[in-house]
Amino acid sequence: MPTALVVYESMFGATRRAAFAMAEGLRPYLAASVVEVGEAPREIPDGVGLLVVGGPTHAFGLSRPETRAEAAKRAAAPVVSGGEGVREWLDELVVHEGRVGAAFGTRVLRRGVPGSAARGIAHRLRRRDVRLLTKPLELFVGNPEEGLLDGEEDRAREWAARLGASLASVAGAGR
């Protein structure tokens, strides 16, 4: 059975919740594990058939050390991802040929607020020659500290289930 690796960066926990929901959606089709970016491997292991990467939108895109420090100052509790972010991890990531993946991000649902961590992640995955199976998924929070809006965890689970089913059908057709 192919495996999936879901790597996430999260400040207040919303992106972590989304990552675990995605693993639930993938598990009927693939063995799926979830890892915080600070613990993620620098080289994607050979057994990983699907790489899913997500992070929060900060200042119109992927977080940077400065935006993570600012988020940590605002947090009532310690932040989930206190070290390196997805941006830095992806810039150093070693990916072997033929990998497929997907990108997701969390962002505030507010009109006129541009930017997307999901699109930035997708761009960096493509630069690493990861073939994206679908367009990036945007998940919404009320404000950064409040977490995912109602229904967003279900959307994450369903999106991942479609990814898993798609990958499983391609693998089944190749037999």
Image: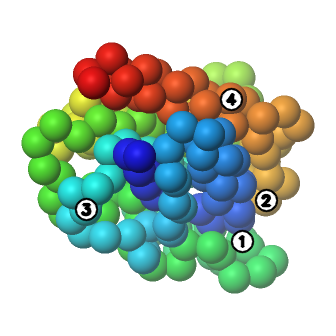
SS at mark 1 in the image? helix
Q: Nearer the viewer, mark 4 or mark 1?
A: 4
What number is the disc on residue 145? 2
What number is the disc on residue 102? none
- Residue 17 spot, x, y in % from top left: 71, 55
Q: In this view, does 96 lie to the left or right of 135?
A: left
Comes first in the chain, label 3 or label 1: 3
Q: Mark 3 points at which residue?
A: 45
Q: Is residue 149 above or below residue 96?
A: above
Rendered image quadrant of residue 47: bottom left
Q: Nearer the viewer, mark 3 or mark 1?
A: 3
Determine crowd level at label 1: few under 14, some 14-19, many 20+ residues with C-alpha closer than 10 A.
some
CB within 8 Å, label 1 to label 2: yes
Image quadrant containing the C terminus: top left
Rendered image quadrant of residue 45: bottom left
Q: Name the residue under label 1.
A: 74
Marks 4 and 1 sit apart, C-alpha to C-alpha, by: 32 Å
Q: Nearer the viewer, mark 1 or mark 2?
A: 2
Comes first in the chain, label 2 or label 4: 2
* Residue type, mark 3 in image: Pro
CB within 8 Å, label 2 to label 4: no
What number is the disc on residue 158? 4
Rendered image quadrant of residue 154: top right
The foreground one among 24 and 104 is 24
Comes first in the chain, label 4 or label 1: 1
Determine crowd level at label 3: few under 14, some 14-19, many 20+ residues with C-alpha closer than 10 A.
few
- Residue 113 spot, x, y in % from top left: 61, 30
* Residue type, mark 2 in image: Glu
Please identify the residue farthest to the left as the structure is shown.
Answer: 97
SS at mark 2 in the image? loop
Residue 120 visible to an observer of this rendering: no
Residue 54 visible to an observer of this rendering: yes
